Amino acid sequence: MTTIADPRTPHVATRRSGPNLEKWGWIYMRVSGVLLVVLIFGHLFVNLMLGEGIHGLDFAFIAGKFATPFWQWWDVLMLWLALIHGANGMRTIVNDYVLHEKTRKVLVWSLWIAAGFLILLGTLVVFTFDPCIGIETSKTDWLIEMCAAR
Ligand code: HEM
């Protein structure tokens, strides 16, 4: 007869000393989850419901938001929290289901590399966004005027 271990039995009998990363990962999922509810629903409300709502969403709307430190930080915080949350959640799933050790390691490393790359790229885009780049080819009158005035 096979006896199934108690669910709380540690996978590794003795834990290494130092910070308990699994515990902090667990706490991070809860704390980032609460913050993401505020950030994501705030983002959807402002973009889709305020003013003209979804009909007001265009290049000028985004350029306006990315010119404001408040929205830059809002979006960057949402990006960081969601990507780390998503990658850590996927790490949990991979650890639970992938039994082959080498495959598991490759997948977990890939998750963090992909998340790190997207965080870097997204942060750079938010803080270096310039609506006037390539303006000569743009046909948007207000943009030509605004960029010429700078
Ligand atoms: C509204 C905001 C969100 C809240 C409140 C939230 C909450 C949570 C919580 C509490 C967990 C842990 C569940 C557990 O350990 O059993 C979790 C897991 C997870 N979350 Fe989120 N989350 C949110 C947004 C997101 C986003 C934007 C992503 C993707 C980027 C995401 C991807 C995941 C994944 C992949 C897991 C692991 C699922 C699992 O263990 O089965 N979540 N979420």
Image (cartoon, grey):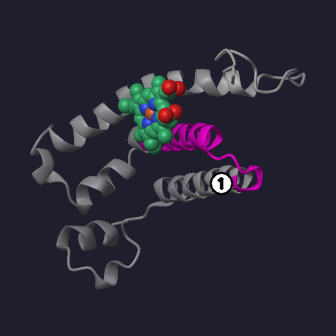
SS for callout 1: helix
Residue sitting at 33 percent across and 77 percent down?
135
Image location (x, y in percent) of residue 149: 32, 67
Residue sitting at 24 percent across and 53 percent down?
61
The one nearer the camera, 145 or 54, is 54
Res. 52 in view: yes
Above-or-below relation of 3 to 139: above
Q: Which residue is mark 1?
A: 107
Q: Which residues are magenta?
A: 75-103
Residue sitting at 30 percent across and 85 percent down?
137
Assign the N terminus to one quadrant of the image: top right
In the figure, residue 35 lies in which quadrant?
A: top left
Q: Main secondary structure of the magenta part?
A: helix
Image location (x, y in percent) of residue 94: 61, 44
Amino acid at pointer 1: Leu
Apparent side of residue 19 relative to residue 139 in the rendered image (left or right): right
Apparent side of residue 36 relative to residue 14 in the rendered image (left or right): left
Apparent side of residue 108 relative to residue 134 in the rendered image (left or right): right
Mark 1 vs ligand 1: CB below 8 Å: no
Above-or-below relation of 66 to 34: below
Res. 73 in view: no
Q: Which residue in the rendered view is the most extreme toward the bottom?
A: 137
Assign the C terminus to one quadrant of the image: bottom left
In the figure, residue 6 lies in which quadrant?
A: top right
Above-or-below relation of 26 to 72: above
Image location (x, y in percent) of residue 13: 85, 21
The one nearer the camera, 147 or 137, is 137
The one nearer the camera, 43 or 118, is 118
Residue sitting at 76 percent across and 49 percent down?
101
> Is residue 95 a member of the stretch shown in magenta?
yes
> Is residue 5 a member of the stretch shown in magenta?
no
Q: Within 10 angstroms of label 1, few (less than 14), some, or many (20 or more) residues? A: some
